[in-house]
């Protein structure tokens, strides 16, 4: 419990916050000057003045949909949409593609996506062989993990996906210390080995990502002698958070500033509230500022029992994009938030869309004291913003679930 990747993991939390915020102005200025997209997004911003969380929260959130739109618009002149601060050549060894299609540059740093920290927390050490079950084709997943393993001093077998028989044969021959990849593919390999009566005694740990890793599957792996840990990383941002042996949430990476915002807005939520994960990275090659991942999570209270002092989050809790079409018109979470901002006495709201196709009904449930006048004013605001009628119902504080949902589509599609 005292074996850490580096001293950054056990910094005093106040010191970490001061050091990250002290480094923020230079990173913002770098993005403003060297990534043309942020030259536009941060136009007029005095980067030297952004030294607090409040100042950071005043900057716009850039969501993946906006990044994709810019990339598509500039495809012929700049396939990265102006978000890359590096150009083709030695500074950009490889380019990857994610569904969309979104193109991501890889920088020349040995651990460009910073995944060595997560691998270390999962128990991997210098000199070990890791079987990499992430894809090496088009997408960066295989490279994201491989680069971290190399930075840690590990050797990697680039298994990729598919060809299960050949991958199992390689595990038998090479005896890897562990696996990195999706949990479902690891299960497929282990089930195939069991069906063939083959033991894999060297395989004792795994770093898993890319999909849900439920406790039932964690326990299934443990029964077979494999300690599975998970991490949360994206092609855009690299490592965001990672699991430790305490298995109590995910600890934030040391190279990011994280905010949890109300879906569809840039409004920061209190710790414990479920909202969209927004990340500012200190990557100089791909300097994303307040980048909305579209994923839901929440901050957990207190430090990790392992002694790591960085903030913990609950992990992936779903998607934040809840845009819904009602009576032929799109309704966005940001519109619900815009109505809420007019009424500070409303602490939480949830728009429920019910009925059957062609007979949509909207009910806005708000946490506020029972007040018919407030409900009517709120209904008027929603109609003004969305151009749609809705019924507003006041409910007691704490009634609405803390799951990050702003819009719930409860219609029947039979």
Image (tube, grey):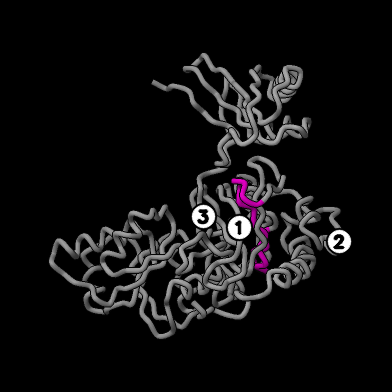
Query: Is 208 located above or below residue 43 in the figure?
Result: below
Q: Nearer the viewer, residue 125 or 226?
A: 226
Question: Which residue position holds label 3?
Answer: 315
Q: Is residue 231 left or right of residue 272?
A: left
Tell me if mark 2 has few (under 14), some (14-19) or many (20+) residues whose alpha carbon lies within 10 angstroms of its own.
few
Q: In the rendered structure, which disc, 1 or 3, sits on the residue that comes first in sequence?
A: 1
Residue 283 in the magenta stretch? The answer is: yes
* Residue 275 pos. (x, y %): 61, 45
Indicate which disc, 3 or 2, sits on the residue closer to the N terminus.
Answer: 2
- Kindly identify the residue that appears in the image at 23 percent across and 68 percent down: 168
Residue at the top extreme? 359
- Which residue is denoted by mark 1 in the rendering? 301
Helix, strand or loop under label 3: loop
Which element type, helix, strand or loop, lies under badge 2? helix
Toward the viewer: 370 or 78? Answer: 370
Q: Residues within 10 Å of mark 3 (few under 14, many from 20)?
A: many
Q: Nearer the viewer, mark 2 or mark 1?
A: 1
For label 2, the residue is 49
Tell me where the magenta segment starts and ends, as one range. 271-288
Q: CA distance from mark 1 to mark 3?
A: 13 Å
- In the image, 100 versus 205, the foreground residue is 205
Residue at image x 50%, y 56%?
97
Residue 195 in sight in this render: yes
Contact between marks 1 and 3 (CB within 8 A): the answer is: no
């Amino acid at each position: 419990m005292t074996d850490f990747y580096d001293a950054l993991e056990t910094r005093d939390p106040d010191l970490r916050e001061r050091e990250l915020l002290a480094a923020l102005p230079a990173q913002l200025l770098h993005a403003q000057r060297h990534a043309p997209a942020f030259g536009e997004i941060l136009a007029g911003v005095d980067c030297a003045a952004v030294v607090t969380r409040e100042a950071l929260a005043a900057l716009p959130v850039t969501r993946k949909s906006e990044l994709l739109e810019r990339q598509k618009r500039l495809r012929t002149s700049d396939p990265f949409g102006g978000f890359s601060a590096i150009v083709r050549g030695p500074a950009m060894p490889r380019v990857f593609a994610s569904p969309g299609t979104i193109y991501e540059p890889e920088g020349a740093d040995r651990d460009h996506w910073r995944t060595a920290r997560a691998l270390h927390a999962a128990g991997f050490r210098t000199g070990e062989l890791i079987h990499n079950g992430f894809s090496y084709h088009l997408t960066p997943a295989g490279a994201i993990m491989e680069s971290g393993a190399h930075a840690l001093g590990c050797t990697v077998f680039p298994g990729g996906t598919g060809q299960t028989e050949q991958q199992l044969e390689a595990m038998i021959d090479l005896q890897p210390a562990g696996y990195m990849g999706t949990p479902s593919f690891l299960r497929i390999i282990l089930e195939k080995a069991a069906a063939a009566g083959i033991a894999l005694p060297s395989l004792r740990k795994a770093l898993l990502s890319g999909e849900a890793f439920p406790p039932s599957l964690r326990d299934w792996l443990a029964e077979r002698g494999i300690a599975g840990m998970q991490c949360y990383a994206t092609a855009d941002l690299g490592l965001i958070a990672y699991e430790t042996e305490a298995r109590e949430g995910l600890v934030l990476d040391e190279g990011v500033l994280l905010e949890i915002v109300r879906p569809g807005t840039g409004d920061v939520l209190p710790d414990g509230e479920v909202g969209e994960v927004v990340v500012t990275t200190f990557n100089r090659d791909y300097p994303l500022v307040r980048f909305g991942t579209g994923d839901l999570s929440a901050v957990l209270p207190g430090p990790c029992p392992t002694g790591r002092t960085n903030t913990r989050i609950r992990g992936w809790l779903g998607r934040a994009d809840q845009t819904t079409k009602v009576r032929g018109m799109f309704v966005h979470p940001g519109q619900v938030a815009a109505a809420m901002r007019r009424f500070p006495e409303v602490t939480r709201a949830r728009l429920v869309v019910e009925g059957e196709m062609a007979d949509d009904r909207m009910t806005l449930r708000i946490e506020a004291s029972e007040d018919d006048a407030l409900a009517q004013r709120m209904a008027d605001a929603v109609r003004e913003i969305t151009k749609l009628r809705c019924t507003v119902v006041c409910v007691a504080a704490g009634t609405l679930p803390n799951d990050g949902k702003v819009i719930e589509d409860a219609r029947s599609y039979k």
